Image: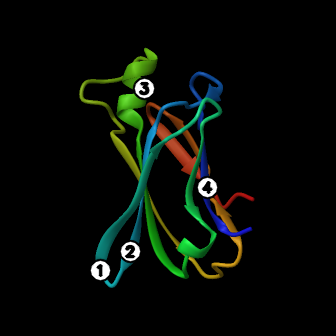
Amino acid sequence: MSGLTTHILDLAAGRPAAGVAVRVSARRGGEVVPMAQTLTDADGRARLVEGADLAAGGYRLEFEVADYFKGSGAAVSDPPFLDVVVIDFAVADASQHHHVPLLVSPFGYSTYRGS
């Protein structure tokens, strides 16, 4: 089943990051076109784009991590070092499922193509 999902893990606390605002947009010819916005569930997961709505091309994910860390009680700088994490990526084969996890702390993050 094709589509786009994410999973956010709070590395500082060692748990899923629940309640993080996530936005997905299509990047088409220099334009960024909003597609969807949601919050991660209790397991830090979010389903962003369903099957037929995913096409080959560029996409942008935006994660509101500063608000999450402030709300979680984590020690963050003022202003926070990380505010919004932006990941630009491309889909080559829209028939495949694309999972883009985010591993994050108040001072760093990493991502990869998940399964």
Q: Amino acid at mark 1?
A: Gly
- Tag 3's secondary structure? helix
- Tag 2's secondary structure? strand
From the image, tell me which residue sits under label 1: 30
The residue at the point 64 percent across, 26 percent down is: 15
Q: Residues within 10 Å of mark 1 (few under 14, many from 20)?
A: few
Q: Amino acid at mark 2?
A: Arg
Q: Amino acid at mark 3?
A: Phe
- Tag 4's secondary structure? strand
For marks 3 and 2, the one nearer the N-term is 2
From the image, tell me which residue sits under label 2: 27
Give the Cα distance between marks 1 and 4: 24 Å
Q: Is residue 74 left or right of residue 79?
A: right
Q: Amino acid at mark 4?
A: Thr
Give the Cα distance between marks 3 and 2: 28 Å
How far across and how far down the image is residue 20, in percent?
46, 36
Contact (CB < 8 A) between labels 4 and 2? Answer: no
From the image, tell me which residue sits under label 3: 69
Residue 68's place in the image compared with 108, above or below, is above
